[in-house]
Amino acid sequence: MSGGRGADMFEVTPGMRRLAASVLGMQAIVVALFTPVAIAVAHIDTTVAVSVGIGLAVLCVLVAGMLKRPYGYIAGSFVQLLTIATGFLVPTMFVLGVLFAALWITAIFVARRVEGATKR
């Protein structure tokens, strides 16, 4: 079923895509830098730290490329949850994860509001 009511409920706008991709790009840098912090400060096993940090950074970049479709925003929200979960390895990541989740939500709603106001 295409073009139904569900498709109109979440329309991907260019501004929303730009803002959300910017958040994921910054987030990729931060979670990549999680790796040396996890190894040196939190004494996490190197294999675990590299797998989580670099894997999540790559996931951020991949999801940023999926933002043309609504399912990209579902994947992006899942990435936010995973970022918060890295706080179990390095407690500071709880704070950074919540900050990025707030930026993610803000990017979506602010872009929708601004572009909705300009359509009128």
Image: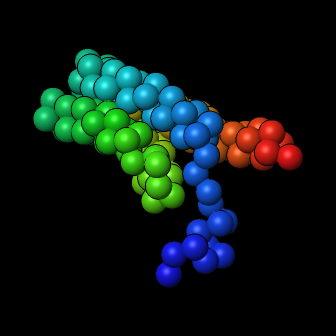
Number of numbered discs present? 0
Q: Is residue 76 left or right of residue 9?
A: left
Examine the rendered structure and indicate whether residue 16 appears above or below residue 92.
below
Say which of 88 and 115 sits in front: 115
Q: Residue at x 66, y 66 (%)?
A: 9
Instruction: List the single residue furthest toward the left.
Output: 47
Query: To which quarter of the image does residue 95 belong?
Result: top right
Residue 30, visible in the rendered structure: yes
Q: How is the image coloured?
A: rainbow
Give the percent coordinates (x, y) of residue 22. Answer: 51, 29
Examine the rendered structure and indicate whether residue 39 appears above or below residue 54.
above
Give the percent coordinates (x, y) of residue 31. Answer: 37, 29
Say which of 32 and 14 sits in front: 14
Q: Residue at x 46, y 49 (%)?
A: 68
Give the percent coordinates (x, y) of residue 96. Answer: 52, 31
Examine the rendered structure and indicate whether residue 80 appears above or below residue 6.
above
Say which of 96 and 71 sits in front: 71
Give the percent coordinates (x, y) of residue 82. Answer: 41, 47
Q: Is residue 80 left or right of residue 112?
A: left
Residue 82, visible in the rendered structure: no
Q: Residue at x 59, y 69 (%)?
A: 7
Q: Residue at x 37, y 41 (%)?
A: 65
